[in-house]
């Protein structure tokens, strides 16, 4: 039986005794102008969607660097020059990633050499960019057999199928970009690129039909089988006869869709962003999906009993949990909201995952709110979420798209970067007073899949249990690879276990609070790590 944090729990955070049913109010300070971040995602019709960012460590100093898509303009790459606990600081650097027509990007160590590569989504040909280890990158499409296509790419996910040295990469494509006047029903095929048999590089792409214009996708182990499936958030604005989708991806087999006969429930929304987290501690993830005035928070309708495998039947619990965020929560614009990037992160370190949602009108759509503040929904110990974006200082009403939540200055608090369309990107430093203790871990394993994509990380304290899946994909055209962050409230120690991809749970590591730890699959103890500056 998994333990749930209870209302009776008492958190002792930073010397403050706080009742468990009163969440600490997070606090952020915007440092856009002083940080060195100076990017705008711009462009006309083909850039109404997209606008992503990627955060990853390109030089081995432990600080996450940032790539921000520019749309019609070249992307911008920033090296993180922050010091631990200090103001956020970035410096532009020529990297080879300064390509035009970029909608978003995701970091992924494709070739398993321990150096991060980047998958770039574009209007036109997508690219895989090989990292050289010095924050420079080179096109690898031809060397690796990667088919970049010539579409309008708006979604991505990657996994390692059992027995393969190289990843399987899924690319989601939007509408036929030549059909500007009559685009409805023109969703172009999504593709799956698997590795070549017995070797490095990729085999020819496989089309995933029917395709329904996804704006987010995620390989996720929704049923704890050890084998992830491919879930897609599809935009109903442009497909005909479509719905939300989930594909079975099994080694050596052709992809197949889950259907009504399997228990998959028919759902049509303007699917834009996708994120997963086990919110109730039952071992199965909940999934948040952003949309236009119809955001969802899904959980399994019938949790399995007596070890029986679950059916992929989900029910919406967004309304009772307080995460609908259908309309602006402040201002006088009462029209419905348009939601994009979404991410679960514990921003006040109380041991409960909070939810960030980026908001912004598509393209002067008069039926939807024009001044639409971003949401920061803070979870309480009753499992319900309370809007705190205005109190936290992150309720921007710029036209947001993608973003990244990551600990950029390595002080144990999750910071926030948001990419805006036709307006400067914004970055906030987390300065929450009275925040709880924390842990940040980084996974490493030998051979393929160095960063253990698909692993589950479990953190147990006297207050309860948290579980997080390590993924490459989701959100809205924005990805992060680096430290996996956990708030642990007033706990001084924690037991951390990893279910490595395709394996059972390993033995726990004993960790003290407020530290960075490298968890190596080949080691029996964790390795403590200290920021170099």
Image: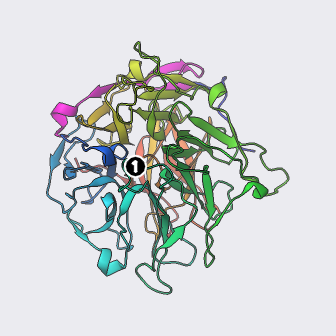
Query: Which of 19 and 180 lies nearest the eye of the viewer?
Result: 180
Tell whether position 135 is magenta.
no
Residue sticking out furthest to the bottom: 198
> Horizontal and vertical percent for residue 48?
34, 42
Identify the residue at horizontal 52%, vertical 55% (top origin): 218
Tell whether position 29 is magenta.
yes
What residue would you read off at disc 1? 516
| Local SS, label 1 | strand
Left or right for 521, reference 114: right
Residue 24 seen in this snapshot:
no
Query: Which of 487 and 266 lies nearest the eye of the viewer?
Result: 266
Left or right for 195, reference 50: right
Is 85 above or below relative to 157? above
- How many numbered tags mark residues here? 1
Identify the residue at horizontal 68%, vertical 48% (top origin): 283
Left or right for 355, reference 58: right
Placement of the N terminus among the 4 image quadrants: top right
Residue sticking out furthest to the front: 181
Q: Magenta stretch: give its range.
A: 11-37
> Horizontal and vertical percent for residue 409?
29, 41
> Horizontal and vertical percent for residue 356?
45, 34
Residue 232 seen in this snapshot:
yes
């Amino acid at each position: 039986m998994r333990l749930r944090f209870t209302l009776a729990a008492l958190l002792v955070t930073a010397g403050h005794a706080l009742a468990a049913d009163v969440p600490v109010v997070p606090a952020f300070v915007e440092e856009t102008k002083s940080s060195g971040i100076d990017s705008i995602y711009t462009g006309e019709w083909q850039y109404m969607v997209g606008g992503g960012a990627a955060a990853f460590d390109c030089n081995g100093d432990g600080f996450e660097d940032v790539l921000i898509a520019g749309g019609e303009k070249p992307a911008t790459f920033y090296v993180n020059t922050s010091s631990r606990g200090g103001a956020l600081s970035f410096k532009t650097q020529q990297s080879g990633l300064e390509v035009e027509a970029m909608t978003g990007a995701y970091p992924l160590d494709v070739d398993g050499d321990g150096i991060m590569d980047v998958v770039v989504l574009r209007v036109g040909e997508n690219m895989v960019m090989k990292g050289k280890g010095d924050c420079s990158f080179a096109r690898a499409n031809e060397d690796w057999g990667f088919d970049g296509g010539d579409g309008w790419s708006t979604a991505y996910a990657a996994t390692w199928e059992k027995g393969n040295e190289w990843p399987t990469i899924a690319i989601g494509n939007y509408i036929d970009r030549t059909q500007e006047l009559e685009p409805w029903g023109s969703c172009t095929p999504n593709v799956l690129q698997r590795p070549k048999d017995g070797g490095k590089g990729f085999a020819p792409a496989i089309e995933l039909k029917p395709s329904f214009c996804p704006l987010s996708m995620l390989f996720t182990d929704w049923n704890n089988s050890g084998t992830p499936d491919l879930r897609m958030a599809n935009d109903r604005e442009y497909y005909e006869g479509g719905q939300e989708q989930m594909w079975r991806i099994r080694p050596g087999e052709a992809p197949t869709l889950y259907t009504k006969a399997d228990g998959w429930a028919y759902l049509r929304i303007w699917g834009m962003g996708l994120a997963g987290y086990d919110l109730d501690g039952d071992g199965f993830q909940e999934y948040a999906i952003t949309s236009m005035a119809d955001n969802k928070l899904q959980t399994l309708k019938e949790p399995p009993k007596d070890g029986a495998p679950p059916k992929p039947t989900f029910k919406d619990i967004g309304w009772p949990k307080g995460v609908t965020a259908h309309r602006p929560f402040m201002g006088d614009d009462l029209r419905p909201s348009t939601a994009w990037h979404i991410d679960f992160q514990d921003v006040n370190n109380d041991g409960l995952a909070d939810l960030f949602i980026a908001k912004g009108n598509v393209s002067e759509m008069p039926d939807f709110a024009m001044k639409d503040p971003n949401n920061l929904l803070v979870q309480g110990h009753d499992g319900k979420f309370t809007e705190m974006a205005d109190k936290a200082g992150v309720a921007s009403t710029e036209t947001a798209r993608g973003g990244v939540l990551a600990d950029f200055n390595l002080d144990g608090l999750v910071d926030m970067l948001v990419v805006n369309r036709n307006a400067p990107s914004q970055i906030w430093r987390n300065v929450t007073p009275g925040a709880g203790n924390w842990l940040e871990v980084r996974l490493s394993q030998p051979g393929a899949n160095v960063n253990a994509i698909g692993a589950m990380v479990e953190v147990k304290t006297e207050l309860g249990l948290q579980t997080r899946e390590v993924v490459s994909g989701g959100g809205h055209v924005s990805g992060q690879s680096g430290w996996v962050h956990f708030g642990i409230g007033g706990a001084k120690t924690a037991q951390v276990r990893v279910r490595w991809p395709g394996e059972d749970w390993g033995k726990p590591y004993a960790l003290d609070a407020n530290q960075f730890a490298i968890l190596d699959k080949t080691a029996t103890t964790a390795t403590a790590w200290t920021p170099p500056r």
